[in-house]
Image (cartoon, grey):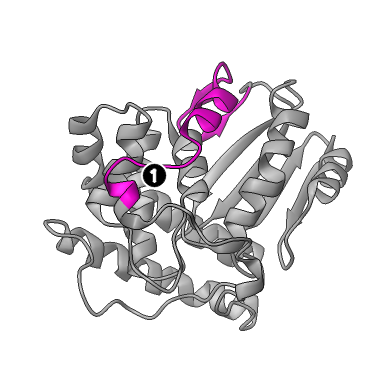
Amino acid sequence: MADNAKTPPPPKKAPQKNAGGSKRSLWTIIIVAGIAAVIVAGGLIYLSQRSGDTSSSESSAADVEAGKLKDVKQVTEFFAGVPQNGNTLGDPAAPVTITEFADLRCPVCKTFALETANQMVGTFVKPGKAKYVYRLWPILGPDSVSATQCAIAAQQQNKLFEYQDLWYYNQQDEAIEYATPAYCDGIAKALGLDMAQFQQDRQDEALWTPEVQEVQVIAAQEGFGGTPSFIVEGPNGTKVLTGSLPDIAAITDAVKSVQ
């Protein structure tokens, strides 16, 4: 959430059982790479404003763990039939690429997802005008790292976009830690993922550490102010959107500028 998210301090505990060593390794990467991001951003990354939280979740964390999630049918129907490969949605040959850098626990990312992202997919991705790349940038503490692990595990089964959308529909208060294995499993089960594979991939450091490391470097190079931030690339150039939350008009202008 541009101008709104704060790069977190080192965690004081391993947030996920049986994966503590991997989580600490990832935090070492985040801390080292994040120093450059903080310098480039000039201190613009700070704690999420409550105004970005559009509504409180009707589903509690316990509900999600128990499989009582909001909007499962809506999410699965929306993405049905849209090509999806890893972290890319849409025709791989589309001339424009819209890349979002987001944190699943970020309330402003939720605002973008529920108010703008689906309009963007309907306007540009489904007609083949652009492809949508979703990259995870966990900057809201250890729980965001846990959420990132889970989303990248869903990505291995080409369900990242359903996973992130369903997460946002059921997102909890950012002031609490809720991205437990049971919470992540609740979303994965609702989407019909292979649970044995999902749980194995969630704990595989080789899957998520290089991804987060690369995103940290990009964030520093581009001077991102926080999540969500965007890079729109096309035949006629590149447009970076960071520092404010773009609406569909801003996304449309960026796409037109690079076509």
Residue 251 position in % (x across, y down): 79, 46
- Give the class, few, some or many, for how many residues have Cα within 10 Å of label 1's Cα (few <14, many ≥20): many
Depth check: give the residue in front, 159 or 54: 54
Is any atom of residue 224 visible in this view? no
Residue 61 position in % (x across, y down): 34, 56
Q: Verify whether residue 76 appears in magenta.
A: yes
Q: Which of the 4 image quarters holds residue 255?
A: top right
Say what amino acid the circle numbered 1 marks.
Ala
Residue displayed at 64% across by 67% down: 52
Q: In the picture provided, is 202 more to the left or to the right than 252?
A: left
Q: Verify whether residue 17 appears in magenta.
A: no
Residue displayed at 60% across by 65% down: 53
Q: In the picture provided, is 6 more to the left or to the right than 144?
A: right
Residue displayed at 73% across by 37% down: 120
Depth check: give the residue in front, 160 or 91: 160
Is any atom of residue 108 visible in this view? yes
Residue 65 position in % (x across, y down): 28, 48
Q: In the picture provided, is 92 more to the left or to the right than 119?
A: left
Which residue is the extreme one toward the bottom?
43
- Above or below, 31 relative to 125: below
Q: Which residues are magenta?
A: 63-90
- Above or below, 195 relative to 27: above
Q: In the picture provided, is 13 more to the left or to the right than 214?
A: left
Where does the N terminus fall, quadrant-wise?
A: bottom right
Residue 259 position in % (x across, y down): 85, 34
Residue named by callout 1: 151
Which residue is the extreme one toward the top?
81
Quick one: SS at disc 1?
helix
Which residue is the extreme one toward the left?
18
- Above or below, 127 relative to 155: above
